[in-house]
């Protein structure tokens, strides 16, 4: 797909993020449908803060964020700290994502059926069907990561923000989860901003990789598009 032809889903202009002091400054970036952008950089440098700022959870210190996604469920966020309801079942947690992505007005008669289909489909994609009724607190760290991914896929977002969603997974699971997410992006035309500590993996998954150094976001590759 030629990303240059479509309207951006997110436009970051002169954006500075941080709490009291800026952590990352003067970010200018556009992300278009189908695009996958990865961000790497050492611990504590502000990657999660940037994602939380794009998600609207932290106020920008400077500059602007323009999102061109549906108000209901258009933005999907897989946080580094997962925010799952630990005593509730996998199905319940994933259902919350599907709920965020349901437009009740457009789907007045069919939303319930479609929502439960979405939930079981997302759970199956993450290989968790046999755990669907288990409370999340009884799952391993990697399984909980996959619940959070299923929750966001069930939401069917247009822009997916994923913060280290592959950590704690073994190689086999990484392959399954990455493939499921890439399939979703391809099918739906959604875009993703991915934070990933493994640089080789970040480069492999994404079209463009940025690293955070000295408070700036620098693009250091334009890899997948070169191969296409
Ligand atoms: N709510 C907060 N209030 C004030 N400072 C915070 C808050 N959350 C994080 N910080 C600080 O901001 C800095 C960047 O944190 P952030 O979580 O964005 O880093 P990160 O790049 O995601 O690191 P990691 O790779 O370890 O996840 C850290 O010094 C952290 O202590
Ligand atoms: Mg982080």
Image (spheres, rainbow, N blue to C red):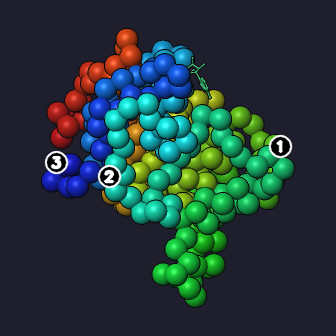
Residue carrying label 2: 9
Q: State which mark lies toward you, 1 or 2.
A: 2
Q: Is residue 96 left or right of residue 48?
A: right
**Viewport quadrant of the C terminus:** top left
The answer to whether residue 98 of the structure is visible from this angle is yes
**Mark 1 in CB contact with mark 2 (< 8 angstroms):** no
Compare marks 3 and 1 and give the one earlier in the sequence.
Answer: 3
The tag earlier along the polypeptide, 1 or 2, is 2
Direction from residue 119 to residue 107 in the image, left or right: left
| Distance (Cα) linking label 1 and label 2 | 37 Å
Could you say whether the residue bearing mark 2 is in a helix, strand or loop? loop
| 106 lies above or below 196 | below
Mark 2 Cα-neighbour bin, 10 Å: few <14, some 14–19, many ≥20: many
Mark linked to residue 138: 1
101 up-or-down from 221: above or below: below
Pick whichever, 60 or 147, lies toward us. Answer: 60
* Ligand 1 lies under 8 Å from the Cβ of mark 3: no
């Amino acid at each position: 797909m030629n990303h240059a032809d479509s309207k951006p889903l997110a436009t970051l202009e002169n954006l500075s993020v941080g709490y009291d002091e800026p952590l990352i400054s003067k970010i200018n970036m556009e992300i278009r449908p189908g695009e996958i952008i990865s961000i790497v950089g050492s611990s504590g440098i502000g990657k999660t803060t940037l994602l939380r700022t794009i998600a609207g959870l932290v106020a920008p210190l400077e500059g602007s964020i323009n999102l061109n996604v549906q108000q209901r469920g258009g933005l999907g966020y897989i946080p580094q700290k997962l925010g799952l309801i630990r005593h509730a079942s996998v199905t319940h947690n994933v259902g919350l994502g599907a709920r965020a992505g349901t437009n009740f007005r457009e789907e007045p008669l069919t939303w319930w059926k479609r929502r439960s289909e979405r939930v079981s489909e997302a759970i199956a994609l993450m290989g968790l069907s046999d755990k669907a009724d288990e409370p999340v607190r009884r799952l391993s760290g990697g399984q909980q990561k996959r619940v959070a991914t299923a929750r966001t896929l069930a939401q069917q977002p247009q822009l997916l923000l994923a913060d280290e969603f592959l950590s704690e997974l073994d190689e086999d699971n990484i392959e399954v989860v990455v493939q499921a997410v890439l399939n979703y992006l391809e099918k739906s035309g959604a875009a993703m901003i991915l934070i990933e500590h493994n640089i080789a993996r970040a480069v492999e998954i994404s079209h463009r990789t940025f690293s955070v150094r000295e408070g700036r976001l620098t693009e250091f590759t334009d890899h997948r598009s070169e191969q296409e």
